[in-house]
Image (tube, grey):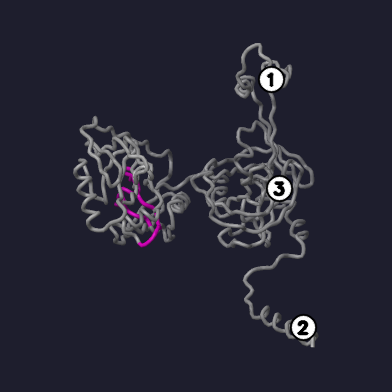
Amino acid sequence: MASRFSLSLSVIFAAILLAAPSFARGAPESFADLSAQLLPTVVNISTSQTLKPSQRSAEMPQVPPGSALEELFKNFSGPKSNLPRHITSLGSGFIIDPSGLIVTNNHVIDDADQITVTLNDGTTLPAKLVGRDEKTDLALLKINARRPLPAARFGDSDRARIGDWVIAIGNPFGLGSSVTAGIVSARNRSIEAGPYDEFIQTDAPINRGNSGGPLFDMGGAVVGINSAIYSPTGGSVGIGFAIPSNLARDVIGQLRAFGQVHRGYVGVNIQPVTADLAEGLGLSGAMGALVGNVAPNGPAARAGIRTGDVILGFDGKKIPDARSLSRIAAGTPVGKTVNVDLLRNRHPLTVRLTVQRLNEPPAKQQRPAAPPAKPRKTTQLGLSLSGGAHGVVVTDVLPDSPADEKNVRAGDVIVAVSDQPVKTPDEVQRRIDADLKSGRKVEVLLVNRAGALTYVPLRF
């Protein structure tokens, strides 16, 4: 009876397994064959930097002359503290061309006086910097090898799915080439490292020295460049971040061609559309990028884009959030004319825009406010207001009020309320009263702070 019951269970489980769809490649029995194939494409990078005595003195703490602490630090720094000191650091990289082109992180080689590359077979060669990009933390190096070198290939990071197996190869803690394995834990992560963050998160162990090394998929293609970790201890806790290969490929291609990156410029300052802003602006949900400042005579101004527009599409790509627009616009070829899909006053609109090259961002112009007159309080939002030359000046913010919760500050200038321009405190109050009477729950203020326009949603 027991054997018949076990047989029945086996049949049921087998049927379940056969019926279940197969979506992903299973875990390999071993990563050995793939590792053997890829290890020769990964290099170790060491750099040296010379600190002059003036730089070193800035490192030493200020202590009272003649004190025991002064003697302690003098002994610690050694008798030759007045001489230049050489600092070395270690990182990783990978070969992308048999001629000796190598990709790594910018922070691995930043401020280096000398860069040395060690190949997987132990060969050590000097490297020169071809180009680097601080905003994406990428750099391109060149070594002169006597023979063609094995090169890695970039994969399509957009096809990397959460749960896919990946392996990281690098030089953790200077130990030499090491292989670790894990999965893609998340995508499109922002860690406030730069304006174009869209990191792949992985639990493949990444430690100091892995920076600049590749993150490979199971097909042997580079889907990321290992760049950062989250760690309270300094070691791997299973939260590592890699620059997606699709972003890196474009940046490296420009570094190879020009030695620098030519980014697209649209000419708008944007902000995220939060749930409160979406409700206040009458949108169906938190989506797109809300336009604040529009640079005079810039591409957006010439295309007819205005403050208050919500950008939902750019060059055929959906814009789910403000960060996406910054990244997509920057990666658009300079001179290309694209369609920009907008919402203006809750109505869809498409305009044509020609992308320019990003140089230095336009300087913000301070708009001076007039001296405060007799203030007026808006009890619904917690503001004290006064008339100004270019709007209504905030003179005070009540603690724990809706305005205080959204970080409205004294000195901010209210330019518009619910997209209606205001010039006096009475106009602000009338607009608030009308919106309250209509049943609106969120009031949206357009605020000028040091020349930058920002939409601020305040919930009544």
Judge whether residue 289 is colored magenta. yes
Task: Return the residue nearer the eye: 205 or 125.
Answer: 205
- Quadrant containing the N terminus is bottom right
Q: Amino acid at mark 3?
A: Gly
Q: Are marks 3 and 2 in contact (CB under 8 Å)?
A: no
Q: Which mark is residue 81?
A: none
Q: Amino acid at mark 2?
A: Ser
Q: Amino acid at mark 1?
A: Phe
Q: Quadrant of residue 13?
A: bottom right
Observer able to see residue 106: yes
Which residues make up the magenta segment? 284-311
Q: Which residue is mark 1?
A: 73
Tag 2, which secondary structure?
Answer: helix
Q: Which residue is mark 3?
A: 170
Q: Which residue is mark 2?
A: 6
Q: Earlier in the sequence, mark 3 or mark 2?
A: 2
* Spatial CA span between label 1 and label 3: 36 Å
Tag 1, which secondary structure?
Answer: helix
Residue that appears at 69% across and 51% down: 205
Image x and y of residue 46, in percent: 70, 37
Image x and y of residue 17, in percent: 68, 78
Image x and y of residue 331, in percent: 48, 51
Residue that appears at 58% across and 40% down: 131
Q: Quadrant of residue 137?
A: top right
* Spatial CA span between label 3 and label 2: 48 Å
Observer able to see residue 305: no
Q: Are marks 1 and 3 in contact (CB under 8 Å)?
A: no
Task: Return the residue nearer the eye: 424 or 118.
Answer: 424
Would you call the spot at circle 2 few (<14 residues within 10 Å), some (14-19), or many (20 or more)?
few
